[in-house]
Amino acid sequence: MNSPVSPATPPPAVVATALAKSYPRGREVVFALREVSFEIHAGEFVAIVGASGSGKTTLLNLLGCMDTPTSGKLQLDGRDVARLSESERTRLRRDRLGFVFQHFGLVPTLSVAENVALPTLFSRRPDPERVQFLLERVGLSGRRNHRPHELSGGEMQRAAIARALINRPLMLLADEPTGNLDSQTGAAILDLFRELNAEGLTLVVVTHNPALADDAQRRLTLRDGSIVPAER
Amino acid sequence: MKLSWLSLALKEGQRRPVRTLITVAGIAVAVAALASLLAFQRGYQNGLSAELDRLGAHVLVVPKGCPFDAASIALHGANWPCYLRASYLDEVRAVPGVATAAPALMAAFPKSDGAQTVVVGITPEFLALKPGWRIQGKFPSASDEILAGAEVARVRGWNVGESVRIDELPGQRRVSGVMDSTGGSDDAFIFLPLASAQHDLRHEATLTHILVRLRDPAQLDDAVARLRGCNAGMDMNIVPLTHLFRTIQGMVGSTSLWLACVATVALLAAAAGVSNAILMAIAERTREIGVMRALGASPGDVFRLIWIETLLVCLAGSLLGLLAAGIASRGIESWLRDRLPFAPDDTLVRLEPAVALMCLGGAILLGSLAGFLPAWRAARLTPRDALRNPSGA
C-alpha cells in the first residue's frame, strides 16, 4: 500500500489490490504490472512516473476501464471493475472519468466547440452552455469555431482538457499531457491542472515531466511493473 | 452546426474529399446505369402497350415480308414495298371470329427537310378500331374530303371546313374533320376515303394492310390459324400484334437483361468500393475511434457512426446517379431510337418515381450491407487496442 490515509480522509476513489496485467507475446508472457496495490483518494493529484515500459500506460488503461486486469482487484468509486459489463465500463468512462492524451485526440473535422461537445453526443446529454463555460474556462472561447489544425499545441491540449471535463467527471486521467508541448506551454497546462485540482477534481497523470511530477501531491513510481516505495 | 450523428458523419466525408468524391462517383455511375435501364424497360413496355391500344387491332394483315417492318410501317407510316389485293378483304371478313376488318392504303412522301407527308386511305370501319379518336367535324365521306391528324393540322394551320391543297395529291381537298391529339402516329397522318386514296395514288383495288379486330382476343391463336388457312392465306402475312409486340419486347428484354447484369455488377463493384473506402478510413482513424471509445462511445455508437457514413456516401451517389440519369434520358432516348428495330411513339426512357425509389432503396440497402463489415470491425475495436494503433489522429 502506498497511501497516507488519515481517519478524516474521504473514502478512496480508487482501490487497487494486487493488480496485475500480463500479455502473451509469442510463446512468452509479458508482465506489464505485477500485483500493484494502492489507493487514490477523491481530490488527490497523483503523478504516475517511471521509465518507458515500466507499466505506466497499462496502469492508466486499467484505471480508465479501457482494459481489464489479469488478476487482482480494482475498485473505482466503490465498484469492482471486474464485475462490470462492457456497457457498464463504457458508462463509467463516459460519466465518471475524463481522459487527456499526449496527442490530444481531437477530431480534425470538428471545430473546437464540437470537439468539446463530442462526449455529450455519446451521453445523449447536449449541454451547449457548459461547452461555452468550459471554453471560457480554458481560454478558448474566441477559438470555438476553429479547427484543431488552426490551433497551437497548447490550445489543442486545453481543448482536450475542456472536452475531458464536459460530462463533469470525478477523476481526470492524463497520459503524458505535456509530452508534445514546449516547457512554457507545458507550464500553462500544469497551472490549469493545479486549478482543477484545487476545485476538487481528482487528477491522475502519467508523466515524464519532472515539474508536473513534482507538483503532484503524490507520486506512484513504477519500475518493471511494480510500484517503487514512495520517495516523498 | 449543432453536433449530431449526422453532422459528425457528414464532416467525416470532408476529411478526404477526393476519396469521398471518387466513391460517390462510383455509386452514381452504377445507379445512373441501372436507373436508365429500368426507366427504358418500363418506358418501352408502356410504349408498346399504349401503341397496341392505339392501334385497336389484334391482327395485322400485310403483304408477305418481314412482320417487324410491316408493324413499323403500319404504325408509324412509310411507303409500302408491295400490296394486297382488295379482294382479300372479303376473305378476311369471312373468317369466323373476326369482328372488324379495316382496310388501309398508306403512302408516305418524304420531304427535303427529313419530314414526310403520310396519307392513309381508310373506311368508316376504322372508327371501330379507334374508340379513342375525338374528331372535330366529321369523318371524311366525299371523295375530296380529308381528316387531319392533330399535329398535321397544327403545323399546316388547317381548320375544319377549310379548303386546302396537298402537294402530293391532285386537286383541292376540304378538311371535313380535325382529330384531337392521340399521342401516337395518327396525329401525323392525313386520312381520306379509301377509294379516293386508291384512285389518287394510282393503286386501284389494292391495299397496303388490313387491321383486324377479333370478337374474342383470347381466341387469337385460333383466329390467326384460320386466317392463314383461308384461300388468300398464302399471299398474306398474318401478324398477331400481341405476339409480335411480345417478341419485340423479348428481343429488347434479352439485351436489357444482359445490360442489367452489367449494371448490377457495376453496383456491386461500387458497393465493394464503398466498403473498401470506409475500411481504409477506419484504418486511418483507428486511434480516433479509440479516443471516442475512451470518451464514452459504446461499440453501438461506433457502429452507428460508421454505418451512417456509409449510408451517406451511398445516398449521395444514388441521388447524383438519378440526377445524371434524368439529365441524360433525352440523349439516351434519341440514341436508342436511332438503333432500335421498333420504337413506340411514347417516351422510351421514362424515369418514373417508382424507378427512382427502387434505385434509391436498392443502393441504400446495398450501402447498408457494404457498411456492415467496416462498422462491425470498428465497433469491435477495444479502446486500448485502438489507442495503441500508430495510425490516425
Image (cartoon, rainbow, N blue to C red):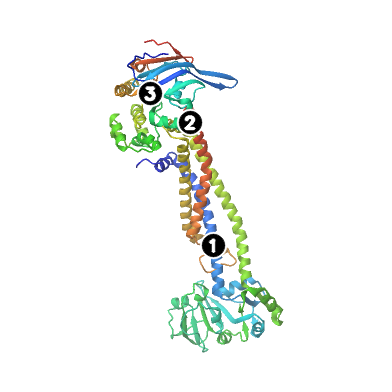
The reply to whether residue B224 is visible in this rendering is yes
Q: In this rendering, is residue B133 above or below A62? A: below
**Amino acid type, label 1:** Arg
Number of residue marks: 3
Of helix, strand and loop, which one carries label 2?
Answer: loop
Residue B178 position in % (x across, y down): 46, 81
Residue A213 position in % (x across, y down): 36, 16
Name the chain under label 3: A
Q: Is residue B264 left or right of residue A158?
A: right
Circle 2 residue: A85
Label 2 environment density (alpha carbons within 10 Å; few <14, some 14–19, many ≥20) = few
Q: In this view, does B78 lie to the left or right of A223?
A: right
Circle 1 residue: B42
Mark 2 touching mark 1, by CB under 8 A?
Answer: no
Circle 3 residue: A177
Of helix, strand and loop, which one carries label 1?
Answer: helix
Q: How far apart are marks 2 and 1 (CA)?
A: 54 Å
Report the residue at 63% width, 80% height from top.
Answer: B98
- First along the sequence among labels 3 and 2: 2
The reply to whether residue A208 is visible in this rendering is no
Label 1 environment density (alpha carbons within 10 Å; few <14, some 14–19, many ≥20) = some
Discs 2/1, front:
2
Residue A177: quadrant of the picture: top left
Specify whether disc 2 shares its chain with disc 1.
Answer: no
Nearest to the observer: residue A13 or residue A51: A13
Label 3 environment density (alpha carbons within 10 Å; few <14, some 14–19, many ≥20) = many
Q: In this rendering, is residue B252 above or below B301? A: below
Discs 3/2, front:
2
Specify whether disc 1 shares its chain with disc 3.
Answer: no
**Amino acid type, label 3:** Pro
Q: In this rendering, is residue B270 above or below B328? A: above
Q: Which residue lies furthest to the front in this view?
A: A7
